[in-house]
Amino acid sequence: MEEEIKLPQFDKEEFMQKERRKAKTAFVAFLFGILIAVICHFIWRSLDENLRWPLCFLFAIASIGFMAKILEILKIDIKDFTKKDWFGSIAFYFFTWLAIFILSINPPFYDASPPKIDSVILPNVQQGNGSVIIASHITDNYGIESAKIIINGNEYEMNKDENNVYVYEYRGGNASYEIVAKDKNGNEQRREGKIFYLDNLIKIEIPNNKLNSKDEIEIRVYRNVSSENFRVYYVVNGFEINATKSGESKDYYIYTTSPKYIGWKNNSENDVKFYAEVIYYFPGIEEKYHNLIYGGNYTIETTEDENIGKESSPIVKDLPHPTSLRTPGFEIVAVFMAIIVLLFIKRRK
């Protein structure tokens, strides 16, 4: 005869006691997390930027010891707490602290961060007859109040476009500049730079005789006009033609072209203007920011050659192109992770 299986008697009172203790413990951990987050908020505001995160984090960890004392004061029985109970309570406290703290040190509650300035000068070096464009993508988590540029002690307003890019066009000579951006809470950021002008950034070498379709024009461009690849082209009789990069010589890149491209006229005087185009894209913005270096205007004669003006302009490869935006900052990721963990812990309880 099989022995009868006896189920343990359900102790309703003991079960209710444990559930009440769990609920009280979670409530205390939650309120304690909020309290420490508020204290850390004021600690954060009084510390240097390099010390904020380490000291606030250490304070939050060190405060865990006070939670057991608070539970005792509130007469919550912790004698029978298992490692699992302690881990759950501490985790609930810590991620409550992390979520509330990060929210408290970001707008609209607090803004201590100055604007971020991503600035570029186009071109890096310009000739005496050209302008320099200083473009700055200025962002802030609360909003930009003003953006100005100081050149040789003189202050100018920068023009803002729809991409939050502030632009100023300068004509003159060598100069130092400083971009000053201020957000709506008065936080300020500065970025310094220099403007350089040099002669002979573009050198044109044209054969002395009348040109046929096989003759080559050599265009030398100073390599330091941009830290990225740039485009060299010319306009002949109203047609725009790209030059082809063919080599290097000391401080210059060498580009070549010939009258075989569409726009040239045979047995004629051709009006030709040469340029180098410097290009830049800010991360996450598809609009092109660019400027030109003017290489001069030439009248070039051609022979009677049926192959002149027949081929399409070459395609330039490896030029700057739009790039994706940077990944979100640590604070945003941490808030989402803290909320997810809190919901997970609450569900397990």
Image (spheres, grey):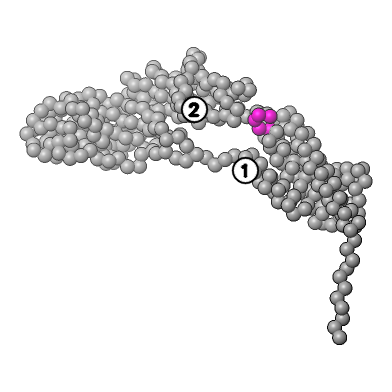
How many numbered circles does the render carry? 2
> Badge 2: few (under 14), some or many (20 or more) residues near its Cα, within 10 Å?
some
CA gap between label 2 and label 1 equals 24 Å
User: Between 31 and 334, which is closer to the camera in this rendering?
Assistant: 31
In the rendered image, the residue lying farthest to the bottom is 1
Q: Which residue is mark 2?
A: 164
Secondary structure at badge 2 equals loop
Question: Image point 74% across, 54% down: which residue?
Answer: 348
* Residue 345 percent location from the top left of the image: 74, 51
> Badge 1: few (under 14), some or many (20 or more) residues near its Cα, within 10 Å?
few
Q: Which residue is mark 1?
A: 333
Q: Is residue 283 left or right of residue 198?
A: right
Above or below, 294 against 155 in this view is below
Question: Image point 29% across, 25% down: which residue?
Answer: 294
Regarding residue 251, the answer to whether it shows in the image is no
* Residue 292 percent location from the top left of the image: 33, 27
Q: Main secondary structure of the magenta part?
A: loop
Secondary structure at badge 1 equals helix
Within the magenta stretch, is there residue 200? no
Regarding residue 349, the answer to whether it shows in the image is yes
Q: Is residue 338 left or right of residue 8?
A: left
Question: Image point 78% across, 41% down: which residue?
Answer: 33
Above or below, 338 against 149 in this view is below
Task: Give the extent of the magenta segment.
Answer: 105-109
